[in-house]
Image: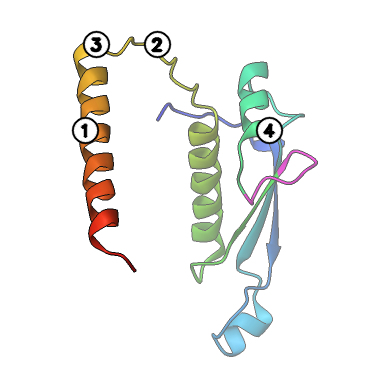
């Protein structure tokens, strides 16, 4: 993975209350982080933006906004780090250029071998069909 550098002003982070069990701590402290990153308004290269917009991930909305909710940790700072790391991983994976496919001509021997195997298999099945009159 390549190193991804994201400007702080391109990322919106909002502290929200975490879900799930945790007692009184969860009910009164906003430790979860809701991260939003607009792909179109970012400083990424144009081809990277296009690849990210075409990338199929449930965290990327139809408007081209990446939404990540981090609530794994009890501390807000750790959740911020987690959200940013997950954003960086998503961007680095989503912007990888697909490998060029090399067109390779199959050797004649492999084609003949495949056809011979098909012929054997069909003969075997034909023999079985005649044995069972059911």
Query: What residue does disc 2 label?
Result: 103
Residue 48 vs residue 21, the one in the foreground: 48
Which mark is first along the chain, 2 or 4? 4
Residue found at x 77% / y 29%: 41
Quick one: SS at disc 3? helix
Mark 4 vs mark 1: give the one in front: 1
Report how far apart the C-alphas of labels 1 and 3 lie in the structure: 14 Å
Where residue 52 appears, as percent x and y from the top left, is: 63, 32
Residue 99 vs residue 53, the one in the foreground: 99
Residue found at x 49% / y 45%: 85
**Vertical arrangement, residue 30 with respect to residue 102, above or below:** below
In which quarter of the view is residue 99 placed? top left
Give left or right: position of 15 versus 114. Answer: right
In which quarter of the view is residue 117 placed? top left
Asked if residue 7 can be seen in this view, the reply is no
**Vertical arrangement, residue 60 with respect to residue 97, above or below:** below
Q: Is the residue under label 3 in contact with that under label 1 (CB below 8 Å)?
A: no
Query: What residue does disc 1 label?
Result: 117
- Residue 48 on the magenta segment: no
Query: What residue does disc 3 label?
Result: 108
**Vertical arrangement, residue 53 with respect to residue 100, above or below:** below
Which mark is first along the chain, 1 or 4? 4
Give left or right: position of 127 versus 99. Answer: left
**Vertical arrangement, residue 130 with respect to residue 52, above or below:** below
Residue 48 vs residue 26, the one in the foreground: 48
Q: Is the residue under label 1 in contact with that under label 4 (CB below 8 Å)?
A: no
The range drawn in magenta is 58-65
Majority secondary structure of the magenta segment? loop
Report how far apart the C-alphas of labels 2 and 3 lie in the structure: 16 Å
Which mark is first along the chain, 3 or 2? 2
Query: Which quadrant is the C terminus positioned in?
Result: bottom left
Where residue 71 appears, as percent x and y from the top left, is: 56, 66
């Amino acid at each position: 993975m390549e190193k991804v550098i994201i400007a702080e002003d391109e990322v919106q982070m909002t502290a929200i209350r975490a879900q799930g069990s945790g007692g009184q701590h969860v009910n009164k402290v906003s430790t979860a982080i809701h991260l939003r990153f607009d792909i179109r308004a970012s400083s990424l290269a144009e081809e990277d933006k296009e690849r990210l917009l075409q990338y199929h991930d449930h965290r990327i909305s139809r408007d081209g906004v990446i939404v990540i909710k981090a609530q794994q940790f009890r501390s807000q700072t750790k959740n911020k780090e987690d959200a940013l790391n997950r954003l960086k991983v998503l961007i680095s994976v989503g912007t990888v250029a697909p490998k060029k496919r090399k067109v390779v001509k199959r050797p004649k021997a492999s084609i003949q071998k495949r056809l011979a195997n098909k012929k054997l298999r069909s003969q075997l099945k034909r023999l079985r069909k005649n044995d069972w009159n059911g």
